[in-house]
Image: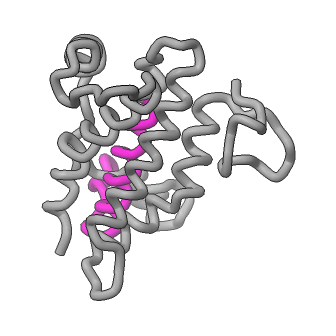
Amino acid sequence: MYELDRVHSAQPATGEVLDTEDYIETAYDQLGIEAALGAYLDGQPGTEDEQEITARLAEFSMRLAEAAMTTGDVDVATVRFGVDHLTRNMNEVCSAKFGYKRAGSLSEAVLIKLGIAKPESDRYVRGLDDRYWAKQFPEEYAEEKLVRRETDESDQQYLGRYIRTAIHGFIFAPFTYMRS
């Protein structure tokens, strides 16, 4: 649980206490990542460029690291939730631009057409699999394979840089191929 003094700018106006998933979703929304990804994907002049998206993802990575380090150890499930949330939203942005999955049945198609059901996002950006989260992430993080720890860097800062690098290399890079 996160109390309001730990939530920084992701505070709800109601004074409620956020759980970890709500904190991550609120941080994601307040950073405007989904809208920025949509603008980047459109590739219109004057819209989000890669540096702006990278800066927003870096801030999201730091907030994700903060949420994952509450007990002193890395909560891999929290990191996974944040990265999966980002991946789902990237797929939603791509689906809105390029098309959703086809309906599986006639009744489903009718419900979608009537606006009763929502179309399912297609998978344009592949998420990180169970093996990555169970084996590769903990090993590479502990052995500093993907990112080397800097001198006098806290565990939370290092985790944030690690997450940023993983997001950029494994998720954002494939997303950039969707740009028009």
- x and y percentages locating residue 175 in the rendered image: 22, 55
Q: Is residue 34 magenta?
A: no
Q: Give the range drawn in magenta.
A: 81-107
- x and y percentages locating residue 141 in the rendered image: 27, 19
Q: Judge from the rendering whether residue 176 lies leftward or rightward of residue 38; answer left or right.
A: left
Q: Is the magenta stretch mostly helix, strand or loop?
A: helix
Q: In this view, does 139 lie above or below 164?
A: above
- Which quarter of the rendered picture does the N terminus lie within? top right
Q: Is residue 16 above or below residue 123?
A: above
- x and y percentages locating residue 161 in the rendered image: 34, 37
Q: Is residue 84 magenta?
A: yes
Q: Is residue 3 above or below residue 69?
A: below
Residue 48, image quadrant = bottom left
Q: Judge from the rendering whether residue 30 lies leftward or rightward of residue 121; answer left or right.
A: right
Furthest-front residue in this view: 151
- Which quarter of the rendered picture does the C terminus lie within? bottom left
Q: In this view, does 42 lie above or below 115?
A: below
- x and y percentages locating residue 116 in the rendered image: 56, 58
Near-viewer residue (5 or 131) = 5
* Residue at 53% in and 64% down: 115
Near-viewer residue (106 or 97) = 97
Q: Judge from the rendering whether residue 22 lies leftward or rightward of residue 41; answer left or right.
A: right
Furthest-bottom residue in this view: 45
* Residue at 32% in and 27% down: 151
How many badges with numbers are in the image?
0
Near-viewer residue (16 or 92) = 16
* Residue at 29% in and 61% down: 94
* Residue at 33% in and 49% down: 105
The scheme the figure's colours follow is one colour
